[in-house]
């Protein structure tokens, strides 16, 4: 199996400030999730850095539901949110997008209300949830929200 990980291109000051992982995905991560009702969902993960834009361009299908994960403890989280909302054409997403904010409990994290306000000023139809991608129950909950289920 080939690895889809590459070294981060961030300064060492970022590592240890909520960014403990020293690698990032450069390809497409793929998985399937089977919901309690028997429905099966394909889950794709794409790299976030601009230098890997080509790897994600084909994964943004017009019919796909989109979950944008943001690090609540990142000093640039709102700038990243704005960039991704523009990139994903959130204004024309017709309810396809959900924003999940993680690491909100860590020191220096922005309040969730700040993310909600920032996103809803621009796109009031986008659901904003707090979730941890390391928690399988949180991921299931986010997928349910993204696919029109309950929070």
Image: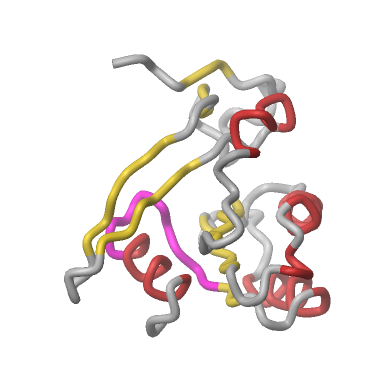
Residue 102 falls left or right of residue 126: left
Front residue of 73 and 94:
94
On the question of residue 81 being in view, the answer is yes
Q: Residue at x 32, y 65 (%)?
A: 140
Question: Was residue 16 drawn as part of the magenta stretch in this picture?
Answer: no
Q: Image quadrant of residue 122? A: bottom right
Q: Which residues are magenta?
A: 129-137
What's the residue at 52%, 23% (across, down)?
22
Within the magenta stretch, is there residue 131?
Answer: yes
What quarter of the picture does the N terminus occupy?
top left
Residue 121 pos. (x, y %): 82, 79
Tell me what residue is drawn at x 35 percent, y 15 percent. 2
Q: Is residue 7 above or below residue 111?
A: above
User: x, y (%) of residue 27?
Assistant: 50, 27
Query: In the image, what residue occupies the spot 76% across and 76% down?
Result: 123
- Position of the C terminus by quadrant: bottom left
Camera-nearest residue between 74 and 89: 89
Looking at the image, residue 92 sits to the left or right of residue 108; the answer is right
Q: Is residue 61 or residue 1 the one in the foreground?
A: 61
Q: Is residue 49 left or right of residue 134?
A: right
Residue 71 place in picture, x, y as percent: 60, 51
The picture quadrant where one finds residue 141 is: bottom left
Find residue 81 and report its image quarter. bottom right
Question: Which x, y percent locates residue 113?
Answer: 67, 77
Q: Between residues 127 and 10, which one lies in front from this camera angle?
A: 127
**Does residue 107 appear anywhere in the picture?**
no
Left or right: residue 52 versus residue 46 is right
């Amino acid at each position: 199996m080939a690895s889809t990980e590459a070294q981060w291109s961030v300064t060492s000051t970022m590592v240890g400030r909520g960014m403990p992982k020293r690698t990032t995905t450069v390809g497409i991560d793929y998985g399937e999730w089977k919901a309690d009702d028997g429905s099966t969902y394909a889950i794709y993960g794409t790299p976030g850095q601009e230098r890997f834009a080509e790897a994600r361009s084909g994964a943004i299908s017009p019919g796909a539901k989109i979950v944008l994960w943001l690090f609540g403890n990142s000093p640039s989280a709102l700038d990243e949110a704005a960039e991704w909302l523009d990139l994903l054409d959130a204004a024309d997403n017709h309810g396809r997008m959900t924003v999940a904010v993680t690491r909100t409990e860590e020191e220096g994290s922005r309040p969730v209300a700040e993310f909600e306000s920032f996103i809803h000023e621009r796109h009031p139809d986008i659901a904003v949830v707090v979730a941890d991608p390391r928690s399988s129950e949180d991921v299931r909950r986010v997928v349910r929200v993204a696919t029109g289920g309950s929070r």
